[in-house]
Amino acid sequence: MNIRTKAAVAAGRFVSWGLRNVAHRNASQLPGRVALSLAPQVIAGLSTKLTEGSIVVCGTNGKTTTNNVVASAIEATGKRVLCNRAGANMAAGVAAALLPKATANWAVLEADELSTVHILPQLQPAYLVLLNLFRDQLDRAGEIDHIQDVLVQALISSPQTTLIACGDDPLSMGVALRAQQKGVRVLTFGIGEDLHIPQDRVPEAKFCQVCGEELQYSYRSYAQLGNFACPQGDFARPQLDFVATNVHAGRDGSCFTVTTPLGASHDIHARFGGVYMVYNLLAAFAAANFAGVDAPTFQKTLDAYHPHNGRLQHFMVDGREVTLNLAKNPTGFNQNLSLLAADERNKHVFIAINDNFNDGKDISWIWDVDFERLAQAHCSTIYCSGTRAHDVQVRLKYAGIQAHLATNVQDFMHGIATASSQQPAYVLTNYSALWPAKAELESMGERI
């Protein structure tokens, strides 16, 4: 490091120490902002203390869980890992995660898709994991083709990086195809069988990434993910390197058999439900495998893993089971609704949608969510909250569903207090509503 970078690192570490030990606050971003303001290339300087390399995880949905599972799996082998576990995924968050003094074997870092163009040129990671691409925060991120352009540019700037991409996603494979043409090595993962599940009403991608012809599917897993091919023959799902078969994904958890590029097969199971979680865990297995994690260690990691970030966290409040999860775009929301519908018990539902800066002001996406599914999901009561509660209430009205208004989670819990305590509750929020809801649930009950 040069003198300027060393000074930036020292300043960042000082801010981190002050936040944690004096202000008792989260230090996931501000130290990185300070360091970057003093030395814009500080990530490159900090990356030199990584003895084995780094892995970057990006994608619209699932990157925090996937990133943290990969980090925990590598740590389970006895290696030291730097990780932005709290989900601070822009350049400042990555810089802050790299600030600790000690050297490390690996850095496992979640990255916002648009931030990869600032992170990859400096970090030069060994692997970039691309989980999926869906419309999200349109007023900030723009349309998906813009995100694809940024990802391709980022990969070209880091020529030694191997892309591990979802082979079932035409949009991710659009990035992979363009990157591969520029010399980037590409490996893929996906589900190798038809799961025979209901499909989303509004898929994200219908057309070939090469010629624009409408894609044909032999089956779809969810949204646009599945076994696709262009009738013109110029674009199709590739032969998958990491393949999941024998898939079961329900409310009680997920299990599948993964076959590796070398032909070995391993059974994986986790307490997290949903088809989307199968993809997340398959991607995590692939990345961890390349970092030297064997299948038994990966499974032990899943057995011990407990999310702390509001994603699929479970609480017990006054004898009532409450499930908290993030739902921030149509595809993510539909997957939450699928999990909710798989629970055949009568239930209460709380939906909180804000339009703060980190949420995006444009919430027109709620009209692409299949809220109609709630009509057959055994919902006793549905409550809406957040700055755009009335918008959600109107959307639900058009779905034929009556919803009540609630100020916050505590108001919701009080509203259902007289109902049977045997009925579970589901709390679905977007970004800025997640942490307040998590704090309220933690104050009212205990995590299970």
Image (cartoon, rainbow, N blue to C red):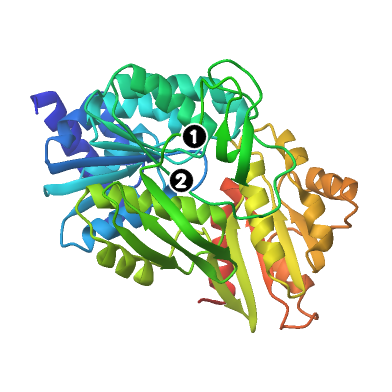
Q: Which amino acid, mark 1? A: Arg
| Residue 358 visible (yes or no) | no
**Pointer 2 residue:** 190
Q: Which sits earlier in the primary sequence, circle 2 or circle 1?
A: 2
When the figure is inspected, residue 309 is found, relative to residue 145, above or below; the finding is below
Name the image quarter holding residue 341: bottom right
Q: Which amino acid, mark 2? A: Gly
Q: Position of residue 358 (x, y in %)?
A: 55, 38
**Pointer 1 residue:** 237
Q: Position of residue 393 (x, y in %)?
A: 83, 49
Residue at the location (62% across, 71% down)?
322
Residue at the location (69% across, 56% down)?
337
* Left or right of 111, for residue 79: left
When the figure is inspected, residue 44 is found, relative to residue 93, above or below; the finding is above
Q: Position of residue 254 (x, y in %)?
A: 50, 65
Q: Position of residue 422 (x, y in %)?
A: 71, 83
The number of discs equals 2
Residue at the location (61% across, 44% down)?
220
When the figure is inspected, residue 145 is found, relative to residue 422, above or below; the finding is above
When the figure is inspected, residue 220 is found, relative to residue 235, above or below; the finding is below
Nearer-the-camera pick, 375 or 430: 375
* Left or right of 412, for residue 7: left
Q: Name the image quarter holding the N terminus.
A: top left
Query: Which numbered mark, 2 or 1, is in the foreground of this view?
Result: 1
Give the CA distance from mark 2 to mark 1: 9 Å
Q: Are marks 2 and 1 in contact (CB under 8 Å)?
A: yes
